[in-house]
Image (cartoon, rainbow, N blue to C red):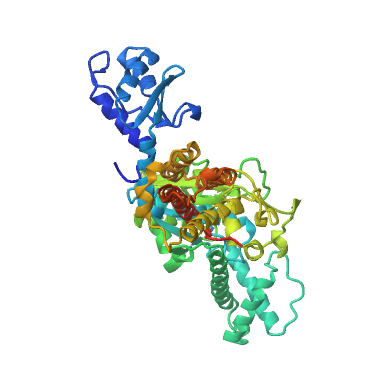
Amino acid sequence: MEMNMTIFAEFENRIKNILQDSNIKEKNGKCLDLSCISVDVPRDTSHGDIATNAAMVLARAVGKNPRSLAVQISALLGNDSDIASVEIAGPGFINLRLTDIFWHTRLANMIKQGVDYGRSNIGKNVKVNIEYVSANPTGPLHIGHCRGAVVGDVLANLLNFAGYDVVKEYYINDAGGQVKTLARSVFLRYREALGQNIGTIPEGLYPGDYLVPVGKALVDEFGEALLKMDRDKALSIARVRATAAMMRLIRRDLAALNVHHDVFFSEHTLHADHGKAIRSVIDDLTLRGYIYKGKLPPPKGHFLEDWEERDQVLLRSTEVGDDMDRPLIKSDGSYTYFAADLAYFKNKYDRGFNEMIYVLGADHSGYVKRLEAIAKSISGAKARPVVLLCQLVKLYRDGKLLHMGKRTGNFITLRNVIDEVGCDPIRFMMLYRKSDAPLDFDFIKVTEQSKDNPVFYVQYASARCHSVLRQACESLQINEIFREDMLEHIGRLSDESELTLIRKLAEYPRLIEQAAMHQEPHRLIFYLYELAGYFHSHWNKGHKDASLRFVQVADKGLTYARLGLIQVIADIFASGLGIIGVKAPTEMR
């Protein structure tokens, strides 16, 4: 048995092996097709620890009704020494209750593995590229970027923990019209830093004060020289310096959120050398019959008086699932955003990525078919893009909605939120709903020290575990409790509340695998919150009933066994919160 094999996978293998060795055959005499057998949590958890659909999926081929086949299978499963009881439910589901010894053995494995418990090789070291944030480098990150940043970062950590080879990537949109607007905005601030009266910031430029230091830096570097040189050259210099300054600002904000990318890929590099990378992709797709010259109708639902049909270089993207064929070259001869997207995807594909995940805002839902079309045109069916859409975050202060104005330059920045509430509450709460569901974030509630605050509730559980371990050392008058001592006495755990906790801990490896396979990092938050609830409930029982307390000075063996349980809970909080990028505190003041 693999150390971190889930109990569901383990018993699925056991059941299949038992059936293979049995005399149960298909009615035509062939061996059983066991591929559809699964093991899961029973519909009613009071009926057992695990359940299998074996009788349900095999009945037709065997030629028996599911319930009578379930009776036959149950008799075979009853010979497994780890199965305490077998019950048949409904039309033929088989519920299994496992022995206390099995759970004690499972807990011993958890203690041995420490914070590596739950780590999986399900990813088989497959290379995965996760692109997230990728905000235009035109200003500081605002709260709208926050959710995607956290979802992408935690998903990357989760996939890495599940055995994938993950690269975290940020695509710098530094070649379009917005960076040209940034250059003009910064040049205005440059003139202001030279003492010129620039008046009101013109409509369409970026008005934020965050560009003032960039203008001053240009003065420090160039003095008045930019005023005297060719305007396009001066704006080009301003663009390069401003983009670099904005990316330094963005990186600092991301670091404050504990987000660190492996790769920052510049769109501008795709346009370098007269767009060599883009031209190469277009040439390749032309040879493969994907490129043609044609006319596009005006956008659906819009009547545009100034719309002028013209021959364009188009990708046959409708042939690979898109809503429309996409233009690649603008009327001025420059490449479109879509053309750059083709070249960027090709770049990732050439770097060995067949699995690519894009974490985008909900307003980018139209990109899904576009990316799928790009993937099919570039790689056939070899590369698989997955798009995760993040819904908006609404900010509240003590129940009152806060309104944001992105265009006014006084929007709520990510750094504002980090400085006020800290990194941990933000990262935790950004995952407290599935990414495609709206999320409310209340400045006051996420910093309350109460059970109504999920962040505090889970971190307090972690701190409480370590408090128990410290108190045990004091009571037993020892400096350290060794895991070997815990292992020796695990069999002493017999209270149903203790066994329930072990069962909950045993779910962790499967939770990791399921969350990774479905790209749903919020499942980890939900699990840790539930585990905290189980632990706090058990602690309260010991508070009321002295016989259930973790430390029994008169019975060191039982104490060590219970501390083993506490140690694993602490390990899982450290592991799970580590994946989330949140501290697992050992004490809270």
In the picture, measured across the screen, residue 246 lies left or right of residue 576, that is: right
**196 relative to 20, above or below:** below
Residue at the image position 23 percent from the left and 18 percent from the top: 23
Q: Position of residue 503 (x, y in %)?
A: 45, 39
In the picture, measured across the screen, residue 213 lies left or right of residue 264, that is: right
Task: Please identify the quadrant where the C terminus is shown.
Answer: bottom right
Work out which residue is located at the far front of the displayed protein and give it. Answer: 554
Residue at the image position 30 percent from the left and 22 percent from the top: 76
Q: Position of residue 411 (x, y in %)?
A: 70, 62
User: Can see residue 325?
Assistant: no
Q: Nearer the viewer, residue 8 or 479?
A: 479
In the picture, measured across the screen, residue 420 lies left or right of residue 289, that is: right
Q: Quadrant of residue 149?
A: bottom right
Q: Position of residue 63 (x, y in %)?
A: 32, 12
User: Can see residue 47?
Assistant: yes
Task: Please identify the quadrant where the N terminus is shown.
Answer: top left
**391 relative to 73, above or below:** below
Q: Position of residue 244 (x, y in %)?
A: 53, 72
Q: Nearer the viewer, residue 414 or 524?
A: 524
Q: Nearer the viewer, residue 240 or 117?
A: 117
